[in-house]
Image (cartoon, rainbow, N blue to C red):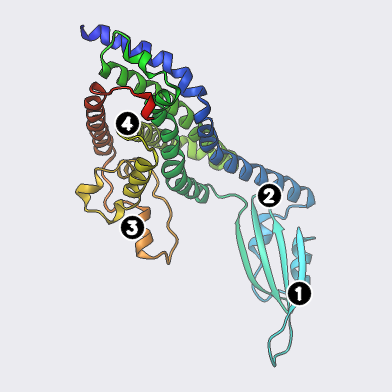
């Protein structure tokens, strides 16, 4: 059988399996994993929009007025200059054997920034001004959500749900023998099923990534977003999408092979999850046997790690020495090829005995 015929067979098998990959009852929860981060970002955007509209209706202060506020001004002087605040409340703070101190918090809004003013005994003590929504901060949050949740949880378990069932699910349904009786090599069947799972998982998680990115942009100031779109947005989105697809390629091959090698799916889940979790402790050579190492190297923005985080946790959250993008891409493709080669050797000898499953 020539290569062109086998390629056509791979395409036919993938096309027939796509419906199963998209609509399998065992993998509907994959959609929830893929879309959950988008719900968070759009929820944040809606909150920002609602708050902006409500505060604007209550009366926005000129930015120059807020910039002229100085420590030591009295409460009456601030209100005379800025007008009625968005929020104004006071309380009394007492300490043992000390006179009570009257504290007051005032919130002002200038259309883009919120200013939190703190008064002590009617004298302005602190002025903290920050944007209602900051694109730079939201990009850092996006990087953290993408690397700590989307790649480590959503793509990981999503690929588990899709690829582990490509063979294992058919064994449970007692339908795999129909494929094995088809006039196609076992390796062709393996690649066809893998391609169907790859297309399905990539489309689902790429959609989730794009929706998250759209929610990130919607929450921020249009002028700031336009400047970002003209500079780094396209490059960063491409890198995130590339990491998403590579995650489906890498984890997909691992869980497809796991579905052929073991009867109990809990075993490969625990082993792979443990291995991916300890890459920060491993020598760089061993890190290159981890899918997550390559995915983090592709991400355009380093995930934020708060100051004071223990060194042990820092090792768990980031690779020791990320590689360049193209080295990461080639490395992950090479790792995937090795896993699929091992799976192909197993699928050649697979025998069906439903009574033992």
Q: Which residue is mark 2?
A: 111
Residue 217 appears in view: no
Q: Are marks 1 and 4 in contact (CB under 8 Å)?
A: no
Badge 4 element: helix
Percent of width and height locating residue 116: 66, 63
Which is in the foreground here, disc 3 or disc 4?
Answer: 4
Q: CA distance from mark 1 to mark 2?
A: 28 Å
The numbered mark, 3 or 2, whose residue comes first in the sequence reads 2
Task: Return the mark for residue 253.
Answer: 4
The numbered mark, 3 or 4, whose residue comes first in the sequence reads 4
The numbered mark, 1 or 3, whose residue comes first in the sequence reads 1
Q: Which residue is mark 3?
A: 315
Percent of width and height locating residue 186: 27, 17
Q: Residues within 10 Å of mark 4 (few under 14, many from 20)?
A: many
Q: Are marks 1 and 3 in contact (CB under 8 Å)?
A: no
Above or below: residue 99 compared with residue 162: below
């Amino acid at each position: 059988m020539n290569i062109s015929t086998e390629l056509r067979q791979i395409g036919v098998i993938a096309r027939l399996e796509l419906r199963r990959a998209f609509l399998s009852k065992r993998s509907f929860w994959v959609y929830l994993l893929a879309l959950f981060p988008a719900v968070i970002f759009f929820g944040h955007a809606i909150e920002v929009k609602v708050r902006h509209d409500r505060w604007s209706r209550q009366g926005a202060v000129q930015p120059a007025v807020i910039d002229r506020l100085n420590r030591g001004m009295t409460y009456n002087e601030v209100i005379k200059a800025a007008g009625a605040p968005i929020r104004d409340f006071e309380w009394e703070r007492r300490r043992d054997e000390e006179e009570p101190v009257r504290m007051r918090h005032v919130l002002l809004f200038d259309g883009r920034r919120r200013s939190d003013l703190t008064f002590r005994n009617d004298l302005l003590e602190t002025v903290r001004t920050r944007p209602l929504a900051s694109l730079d901060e939201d990009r850092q949050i996006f990087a953290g959500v993408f690397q700590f949740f989307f790649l480590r949880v959503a793509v990981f378990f999503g690929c588990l749900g899709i690829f582990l069932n490509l063979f294992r699910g058919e064994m449970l349904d007692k339908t795999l023998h129909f494929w094995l009786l088809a006039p196609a090599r076992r390796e062709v069947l393996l690649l066809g099923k893998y391609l169907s799972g790859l297309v399905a998982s990539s489309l689902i998680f790429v959609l989730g990534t794009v929706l998250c990115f759209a929610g990130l942009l919607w929450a921020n100031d249009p002028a700031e977003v336009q400047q970002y779109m003209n500079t780094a947005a396209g490059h960063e989105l491409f890198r995130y999408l590339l990491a998403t697809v590579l995650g489906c390629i890498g984890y997909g091959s691992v869980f497809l092979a796991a579905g052929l090698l073991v009867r109990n799916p809990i075993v490969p889940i625990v082993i792979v999850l443990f291995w991916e979790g300890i890459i920060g402790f491993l020598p760089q050579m061993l890190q290159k046997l981890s899918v997550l190492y390559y995915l983090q190297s592709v991400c355009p923005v380093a995930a934020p790690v708060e100051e004071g985080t223990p060194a042990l946790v820092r090792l768990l959250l980031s690779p020791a020495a990320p590689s360049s993008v193209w080295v990461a891409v080639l490395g992950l493709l090479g790792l995937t090829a090795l896993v699929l080669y091992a799976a192909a050797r197993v699928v050649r000898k697979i025998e069906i005995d439903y009574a033992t499953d």
